[in-house]
Image: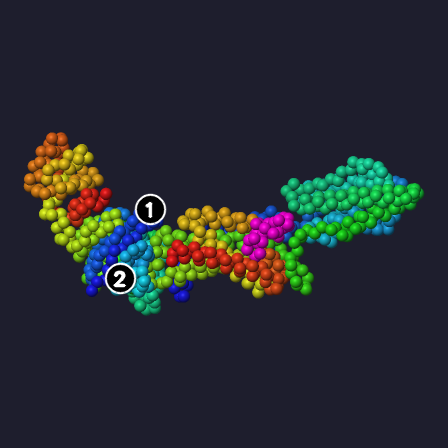
């Protein structure tokens, strides 16, 4: 059984000249699956979540959530879903408990069930001790956890998480990823958007890679890596002249594609790592550059994106 | 419906937990009212305190050879002589109509009168010179002489402005009336002489009679009203005048309820920006209930604001508002129109900042044209028409009516007009909100 079916969705803002946020996208998510939408900022992930949350109407195409049309039966769709928005959408002048109680009522809970669910969610997101404090006094990580907790109150069958780990500390990120796995283990279908390749790799049963509003690849991690075609990833760090090195190595025979880190890091997709590495060392010596670190690894989703678009995910 | 009330309760709590909102909604109108009250004086309900006035009347009358009287009230109507101007000034300042404004005493000489002012026993001294009547009547009952130089001295406490100003205005009014009486006497004499009568005694008597008659009429039938727009109340009982505090505070309340309404109304934009409104729209609660809750919140916030201000006005300034029933109706009516205005000004805007700027301009304009700052003062025919383009003008008119002792029947028309305005504003706000969020 499929939890979400998306057929040829298209959404353009401010037509006819505005940007096309989602362009002819189709995919399916099975019941009980964690499906990640991976892509850089502006790829169309949030617009896709907004359409599937019945916040935006598509210009073309259709989507069904739990078998209900998002355009024709939005009220039924909303009863099935929990949405964790990218921005922290909570009331800072209310306490954590007051927030949960308010949102629980808006989801239709009440009485003893509401109190029970609020207690349970406070436990799940680790805010029992701070439940009576105003949210304005919470740390960013605590707000993020409350942001997620709100979407869990009514025990939705399908959970959307739109970049839920942006701007938080590693500990809170770890906590959120663990919670997502636990929820999925309990039967919740998860649609997760991120531009962090590691999160998509760790969580997802399948990944859809989006770029400029289009779905450019879809499949399990193994299936996507196959797209790279047996190539090998080489991570390098050099002590200087990163720009010059990148330009030189881009045109070396055997380098399929190359991306740069912020400071000294380079990632190469090599047709044959063993044959390429001597050429890299030779080139570095000629440029007067010292290679300080070199790692050979299997290709990951980052390399898939690089392979498909010629750009790094963070570009 | 319960969920709409939940949204409303959350918004109301948000507003009343904000110190900035409380200052704008409650402290500012009370402070402005207090400041205006301080400008008038410190009497209960801002009534102007009676000005302690000392009069030194040295006026000798119209002079030798003329049948002048020294007491206008005793002799002025008899036609036996010209009325004494000094006595006329004394009579005007001591009239029952000015009893609340002027506390009149007399002094035998200018020195003791000035000493009373210097000592703070009196606020103002009016020193009438001995030759005032002679100067006014031009030295001749026929009015053919030139007015002589005579100076009335107004000696006042420098710290007082309003009270001495009133006394000076009354004195000036009496002097002008006397000058009018001179003109009347001259006209009468000239007209009679043209018909051949040249007996000086008869002409003198005629002139005196004409002057006295003019003066008497001028004093008994001034032809001017201090209140240019009397309230249209139909009460059969004695007309009741509201105190200044009530009139000032009602204007401020009506004005500041607009800002009170704009705070929760702007929460639509604030929540949109913060992401909580889109998140609310992802819940199974219909959007109409969510926006309905916002409407209820705006109304409740303004209603509470109005009730608090009315009670504060009663307790702090001794304001009396009128009968409970009409006051309750107008309070609710004011909350409805303020809520509708708050919502409609926000519905046009795209950001909270834009909404704040636009609504402030609109509210100040409405406050100015409706009379929130000027009360019911007569500022001309154009203004009296202009204020009716604003629902607040109608609302203030209704408040004025009940503060003057009016009943339900006196506020029916203004209330209907205000509600009609509100309906239009609510419809406009709903149209724009639906277009954006539906």
Helix, strand or loop under label 2? strand
Which residue does the image show at 88% across and 40% down from the upper left?
B64
Q: Horizontally, is A176 left or right of A289 in the view?
A: right
Hey, which quadrant is residue B183 in on the image?
top right
- Report the magenta residues as a range: B369-395
Nearer to us of marks 1 and 2 is: 1
Q: How is the image coloured?
A: rainbow
Closest to the observer, A32 or B33: A32
In which quadrant is the N terminus of chain A drawn? bottom left
The picture places residue A305, in percent across and down from the top left corner, at 18, 47
The picture places residue A27, in percent across and down from the top left corner, at 22, 57
B22 inside magenta stretch: no
Q: Pointer 2: what residue?
A: A65
Hey, which quadrant is residue A133 in on the image?
bottom left
Q: Earlier in the sequence, mark 1 or mark 2?
A: 1
Residue B323's disc number: none
- Counting other residues with Cα less than 10 Å from the Cα at mark 2, is it few (<14), some (14-19), or many (20 or more)? many
Closest to the observer, B117 or A196: A196
Q: Pointer 1: what residue?
A: A17
Mark 1 to mark 2: distance in Å? 30 Å
Q: Are marks 1 and 2 on the same chain?
A: yes
Helix, strand or loop under label 1? loop
Which residue does the image show at 86% across and 51% down from the upper left?
B78
Closest to the observer, B286 or B342: B286
Q: Horizontally, is A131 left or right of B229 in the view?
A: left
- Number of numbered labels in the structure image: 2
On what subunit does the disc labeled 2 rest? A
């Amino acid at each position: 059984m499929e939890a979400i079916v998306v057929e040829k969705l298209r959404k353009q803002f401010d037509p006819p000249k505005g940007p096309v946020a989602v362009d002819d996208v189709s995919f399916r998510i099975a019941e009980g699956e964690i499906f990640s939408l991976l892509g850089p900022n502006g790829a169309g992930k949030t617009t896709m979540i907004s359409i599937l949350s019945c916040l935006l109407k598509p210009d073309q195409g259709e989507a069904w959530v739990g078998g209900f049309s998002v355009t024709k039966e939005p009220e039924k769709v909303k009863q099935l879903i929990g949405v964790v928005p990218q921005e922290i959408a909570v009331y800072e002048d209310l306490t954590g408990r007051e927030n949960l109680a308010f949102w629980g009522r808006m989801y239709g809970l009440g009485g003893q069930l509401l109190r029970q669910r609020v207690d349970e969610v406070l436990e799940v997101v680790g805010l029992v001790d701070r439940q009576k404090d105003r949210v304005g006094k919470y740390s960013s990580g605590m707000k993020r956890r409350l942001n997620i907790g709100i979407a869990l109150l009514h025990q939705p069958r399908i959970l959307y998480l739109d970049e839920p780990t942006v701007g938080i500390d590693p500990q809170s990120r770890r906590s959120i990823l663990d919670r997502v796995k636990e929820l999925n283990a309990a039967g919740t279908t998860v649609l997760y958007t991120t531009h962090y390749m590691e999160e998509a790799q760790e969580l997802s049963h399948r990944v859809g890679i989006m770029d400029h509003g289009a779905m450019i690849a879809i499949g399990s991690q193994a299936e996507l890596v196959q797209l790279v075609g047996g190539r090998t990833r080489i991570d390098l760090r050099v002590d200087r002249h990163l720009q010059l090195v990148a330009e030189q190595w881009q045109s070396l025979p055997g380098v399929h594609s190359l991306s740069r880190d912020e400071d000294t890091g380079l990632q190469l997709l090599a047709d044959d790592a063993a044959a390429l590495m001597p050429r890299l060392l030779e080139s570095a010596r000629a440029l007067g550059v010292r290679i300080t670190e070199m790692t050979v690894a299997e290709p990951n989703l980052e390399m898939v994106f690089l392979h498909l678009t010629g750009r790094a995910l963070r570009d | 419906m319960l969920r709409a009330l939940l949204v409303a309760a959350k918004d109301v709590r948000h507003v009343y937990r904000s110190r900035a909102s409380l200052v704008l909604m409650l402290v500012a109108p009370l402070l402005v009212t207090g400041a205006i009250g301080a400008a008038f004086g410190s009497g209960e309900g801002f009534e102007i305190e009676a000005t302690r006035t000392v009069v030194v009347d040295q006026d000798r009358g119209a002079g030798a050879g003329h049948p002048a009287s020294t007491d206008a009230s005793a002799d002025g109507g008899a036609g036996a002589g010209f009325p004494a101007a000094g006595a006329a000034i004394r009579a005007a300042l001591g009239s029952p109509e000015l009893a609340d404004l002027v506390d009149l005493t007399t002094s035998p000489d200018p020195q003791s009168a000035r000493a009373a002012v210097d000592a703070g026993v009196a606020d103002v001294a009016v020193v009438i010179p001995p030759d005032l009547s002679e100067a006014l009547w031009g030295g001749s009952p026929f009015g053919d002489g030139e007015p002589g130089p005579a100076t009335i001295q107004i000696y006042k406490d420098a710290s007082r402005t309003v009270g001495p100003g009133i006394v000076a205005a009354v004195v000036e009014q009496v002097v002008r009336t006397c000058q009018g009486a001179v003109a009347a006497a001259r006209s009468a004499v000239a007209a009679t002489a043209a018909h051949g009568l040249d007996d000086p005694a008869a002409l003198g008597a005629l002139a005196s009679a004409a002057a006295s008659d003019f003066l008497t009429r001028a004093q008994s039938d001034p032809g001017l009203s201090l209140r240019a727009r009397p309230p249209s109340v139909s009460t059969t009982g004695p007309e009741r005048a509201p105190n200044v505090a009530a009139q000032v505070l009602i204007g401020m309340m009506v004005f500041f309820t607009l800002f009170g309404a704009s705070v929760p109304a702007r929460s639509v934009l604030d929540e949109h920006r913060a992401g909580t409104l889109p998140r609310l729209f992802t819940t199974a609660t219909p959007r109409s209930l969510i926006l309905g809750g916002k409407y209820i919140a705006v109304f409740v916030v303004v209603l509470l604001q109005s009730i608090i201000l009315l009670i504060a006005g009663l307790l702090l300034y001794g304001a009396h508002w009128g009968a409970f029933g009409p006051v309750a109706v107008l309070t609710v009516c004011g909350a409805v129109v303020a809520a509708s205005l708050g919502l409609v000004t926000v519905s046009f805007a795209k950001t909270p900042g834009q909404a704040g700027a636009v609504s402030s301009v609109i509210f100040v304009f409405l406050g100015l044209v409706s009379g929130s700052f000027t009360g019911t003062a007569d500022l001309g025919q154009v203004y009296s028409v202009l204020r009716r383009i604003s629902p607040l003008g109608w609302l203030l008119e209704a408040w004025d009516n009940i503060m003057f002792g009016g009943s339900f029947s006196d506020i029916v028309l203004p209330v209907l007009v205000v509600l009609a305005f509100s309906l239009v504003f609510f419809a406009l706000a709903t149209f724009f909100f639906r277009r954006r969020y539906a």
